[in-house]
Amino acid sequence: MFFGGAGVSTASGIPDFRSEDGLYSEQFHDVSPETILSASYFMLHTAEFYEFYCRYMIYPDARPNAVHRYLYKLEKQDKLRGIVTQNIDGLHKEAGNKRVYELHGSVRENYCVDCEKEYPLEKIIQSDGVPRCDKCGGIIKPWVVLYGEIPDKYTMIGACREISGADTMIVAGTSLSVEPAASLINEFNGKNLVVINKTPTPADERATLLIRADVDEVFRQLFEE
């Protein structure tokens, strides 16, 4: 199994959240990103939410990097049980992986909060201001888990099932500081826990292999080998 976070996608030009230059170092209209990316802020200040969201959360030109491509290679070889990701960029699926559990949803999936009609990312990008449903005029919401919302039950169940059945798990590019996603590694009972991250994580003590490095650099070396 592969369990990844924001550090997986930085090589694709998508900033992480908690590093010195990450998204959470930004201030927007004197409101913290954590507040803006909450369910209550979306409902009460939808226009401001989308102003921030379109500026900082959507990267339509981002493409899969070495990590995504190598994981696709492993899945094709039937060596990868699945991917559990905290990222919302959809790059694992764009790379070709099928067994992907997107714990926090995806910017590529959107829906009307009134009639539930579904829309692609292009609808959000092409809208001027708050995106509205073509069918009923309702507000369109990204299919992402905002602060104050609960992750999809079936996604969580599937992720737990796959992690518990794996003999090896790679945890990469995540500080394991966001719950309930971080606690999923407690479901792992296999032999080998590999942790790849530039900074310490709560899983380091359990790791059978600890690599303190950039995730993309590690996977590019795997391609070369």
Image (cartoon, rainbow, N blue to C red):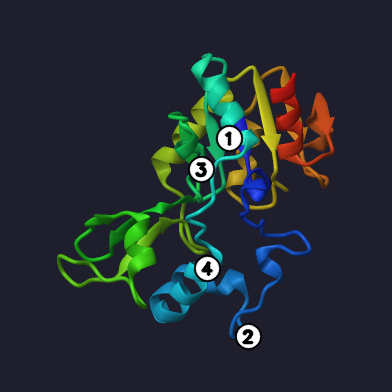
Q: Residue 37 has which mark?
A: 4
Q: Are marks 3 and 4 in contact (CB under 8 Å)?
A: no
- Whether pointer 1 and pointer 3 mark residues with C-beta atoms closer than 8 Å, the reply is yes
Residue 80, relative to residue 131: is it above or below? above
Pair 2/3: label in front: 3
Please indicate whether residue 105 sits to the left or right of residue 5 in the image.
left
Whole-Å distance between the Cαs marked 4 and 1?
26 Å
Q: Looking at this view, name the residue that lies furthest to the left.
A: 135
Discs 4, 1 touching: Cβ within 8 Å: no
Mark 3 surroundings within 10 Å by alpha-carbon count, few (fewer than 14), some (14 through 19), many (20 or more) = many
What x and y, as percent, mark residue 103?
A: 50, 45
35, above or below 195, in the image: below
Q: Which mark is residue 91?
A: 3
Q: Earlier in the sequence, mark 2 or mark 1?
A: 2
Total marks placed:
4
- Residue located at (37% from left, 78% from top): 129
Q: Which of the two labelled residues, at mark 3 and mark 4, occupies the earlier sequence position?
A: 4
Up-down: is 77 above or below 11? above
Q: Which residue is mark 2?
A: 30
Is disc 4 placed on a helix, strand or loop? Answer: loop
Mark 2 or mark 4: name the one nearer the start of the chain.
2
Between the residue at mark 2 and the residue at mark 3, the CA separation in whole angstroms equals: 31 Å
Which percent across, then down, holds residue 149? 46, 60
| Mark-to-mark CA distance, 2 and 4 | 14 Å
Quarter containing the N terminus: top right
Q: Is residue 92 visible?
A: yes
Q: What's the residue type where badge 4 is placed?
A: Leu
State the residue position of label 1: 68
